[in-house]
Image (cartoon, rainbow, N blue to C red):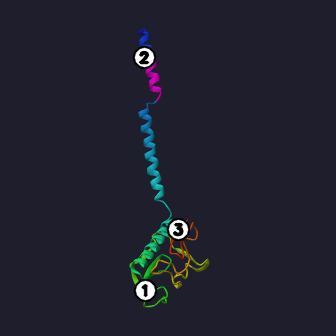
């Protein structure tokens, strides 16, 4: 028969001390866990940003393309006209001035040739000076927005980008040549 060993007071208090010490967490453990959580949140937030809609991406692509074409007009001291070829493709043409009739052989294809939307996004409507000018069925009939050699736009244009059954993004071109994206 085994008999219980008597415990002395020192080992009993040491056991209580170890139990109390192991019940909490050290500052090092706490900072390690918090930094791991922060890293995981950062990775997940980055992944969520990459899931932004193709409409937003297309809207920002079109705005950037328009800004580059405006800069091209100023740099080359020629007018640059940006026209939709269809609902997914845009093209830049250049001529001596915006008063040159479009379409005509005086308009030359610009060095930065075309913009094509990726994914399902497309140009769904265009408003010129507040009036709906074209929907996506007859975009190619519109003469586009022309930037003069001084960077001014030919008209105030709002271009809706996106599928009709989803949230659309509006790209607005102001008379002064500024371009803005409104989500």
For the residue pair 10 and 175, the one nearer the viewer reads as 175
- In the rendered image, which residue does mark 2 sit on? 14
Which callout, 2 or 3, points to the residue nearer the camera? 3
Q: Could you say whether the residue bearing mark 1 is in a helix, strand or loop?
A: strand
Left or right position of 39 against 133: left
Q: Residue furthest front?
A: 150
Vertical placement of residue 35 versus 140, above or below: above
Which callout, 1 or 3, points to the residue nearer the camera? 1
Q: Magenta residues, as a range?
A: 15-24
- Position of residue 118 measured from the top left corner of the image (x, y, whole percent): 45, 70
At x 43% / y 90%, what residue is drawn? 106
- In the rendered image, which residue does mark 1 sit on? 95
Q: Could you say whether the residue bearing mark 3 is in a helix, strand or loop?
A: strand
Q: Earlier in the sequence, mark 1 or mark 3?
A: 1
Give me the C-alpha separation between circle 1 and circle 2.
91 Å
- In the rendered image, which residue does mark 3 sit on? 181
Q: How many marks?
A: 3
- Mark 1 Cα shell of 10 Å, populated few (<14), some (14-19), many (≥20): many
Left or right position of 92 against 160: left
């Amino acid at each position: 028969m085994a008999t219980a060993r008597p415990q002395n007071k020192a080992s009993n208090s040491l056991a209580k001390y170890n139990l109390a010490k192991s019940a909490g967490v050290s500052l090092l453990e706490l900072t390690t866990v918090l930094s791991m959580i922060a890293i995981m949140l950062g990775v997940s937030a980055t992944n969520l940003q990459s899931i932004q809609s193709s409409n937003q991406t297309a809207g920002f692509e079109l705005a950037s393309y328009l800004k580059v074409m405006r800069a091209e007009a100023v740099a080359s001291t020629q007018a640059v006209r940006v026209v939709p070829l269809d609902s997914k493709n845009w093209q830049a043409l250049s001529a001596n001035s915006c008063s040159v009739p479009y379409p005509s052989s005086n308009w030359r294809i610009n060095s930065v040739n075309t913009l094509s939307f990726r994914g399902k996004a497309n140009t769904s409507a265009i408003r010129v000076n507040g009036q709906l000018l074209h929907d996506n069925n007859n975009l190619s009939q519109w003469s586009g927005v022309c930037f003069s050699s001084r960077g001014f736009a030919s008209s105030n244009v709002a271009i809706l980008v996106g599928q009709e059954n989803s949230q659309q993004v509006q790209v607005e071109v102001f008379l002064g040549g500024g371009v803005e994206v409104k989500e």
